[in-house]
Amino acid sequence: MRIGIVGASGFVGRRAVEMLPVEGTTEVCPIVHSQSSLEKLAQYKLDGRIANSFDQSSLESAFQGCDAIIQSILGTPGLIRGTIVPTYKAAQKAGVRRIIYLSSMIVHTSAPAPGTTEATPPITNQPGFPTHIAKIDAERQLLQLHQTGSVEVVIFRPGIVFGPRSRWVTELADQLVNGRAYLIDGGKGICNSVYVDNLIHAMRLALTAKDADGEAFFAGDSERVTWLDFYRPFAEAFGVDPTQLPSPPVPEFTHSRKQELIGSIRESVFVQKTLAMIPEDLKQKLKRSKSQPQQPAPEPKPEPVPVVPAAIPKGEPVVTEMMSILQQSQYQLPFTKAEKLLGYEPIVSFDEGCRRSIEWLSGIDRFKPFLKK
């Protein structure tokens, strides 16, 4: 089996590149949007390809020879919506058998209601979260295409996917270092965690499961993990008592109609598709020109000698709307459907996933001075 991985330079995509190859039976083909992204994967020595995810012909060329496609790209609502049709039609033209689409639990909001299953209708009224609505639209597009198309479709809706290279891990580490970490209501809310290897394992099973076509699945860790449970191993690794983290009140959030309108235009399919057509080297030149100083640069100063801090600096936590909702979740999403139809069972425990994540953090320079030896 040959598996094309769209978004192979991202967090989940890259881990799939590492986990899915099996000598003699399974090959992977990383598919990315630029040469620079492909170079990040050079160490794996794979047949990587470059494709514009908005362009059907570009994708069709990249999909040649692939039996299945994992679509694992992140981005703006325009990118999420605008890449579904070309991906499906390109897969059909290229003779792909099955698409595994990485969606998210956010189609049910960041705090799914008790009793939510994969059959529960998505929540389309989520003011301030255009990406959530885009994921809903993308799923619907994909399933509509599937009704008349020949390519099979499997959808995954994971919650908090963590592990080495995860933003959930680095952002929490940064907050702990800066003294800005917090826990709403002491961290009693449910964290629908899934260690990245468990998610990849579920997707591996879905590549060949006979009864998976046209289905959506939750995938999670075995343990019932609260937000305090999630924060605890990382906080203790940084010498912080997680039970002493501030528990600020949830502020009242408002949404500016003007800002939402500007954002909807900037992140529309048309604008994002247009931006995707700009050559990568031109984008890099524009970035460099913006970053160049307008005045002569000052004389370089000697590099300061790093000082190991005596304690974590104190800062003020900033409660975001997304985290306030996530941390107030009262429901653990079930993955009984994945157990039944895929034979899914988590292969890495939550504790082991945290240990691996902390070990990875210990190799990052900005965190080394703060981590306990």
Image (cartoon, helix red, strand yellow):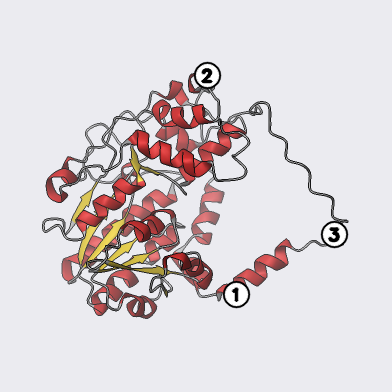
Dot 2: within a 10 Å radius of its alpha carbon, few (fewer than 14), some, or many (20 or more) residues? few
Q: In the displayed structure, does residue 115 sit left or right of residue 18?
A: left
| Dot placed on the residue nearer the N-terminal end, 3 or 1 | 1
Q: Amino acid at mark 2?
A: Gln
The residue that appears at 48% across and 36% down in the rendered structure is 321
Residue picked out by circle 3: 297
Q: Amino acid at mark 1?
A: Asp
Q: Is residue 139 above or below residue 303?
A: below
- The CA distance from mark 3 to mark 2 is 44 Å
Q: Quadrant of residue 312?
A: top right
For the N terminus, which image quadrant? bottom left
Q: In the displayed structure, does residue 19 sit left or right of residue 256?
A: left
- The CA distance from mark 1 to mark 2 is 48 Å
**Residue 304 location (% of width, % of height):** 79, 44
Secondary structure beneath label 1 = helix
Dot 1: within a 10 Å radius of its alpha carbon, few (fewer than 14), some, or many (20 or more) residues? few
Residue picked out by circle 2: 244
**Residue 40 location (% of width, % of height):** 50, 64
The residue that appears at 26% across and 54% down in the rendered structure is 203
Q: Quadrant of residue 105?
A: top left
| Dot placed on the residue nearer the N-terminal end, 1 or 2 | 2
Which of the labelled discs sits on residue 281, or is there none? 1
The residue that appears at 84% across and 55% down in the rendered structure is 300
**Residue 356 location (% of width, % of height):** 42, 41
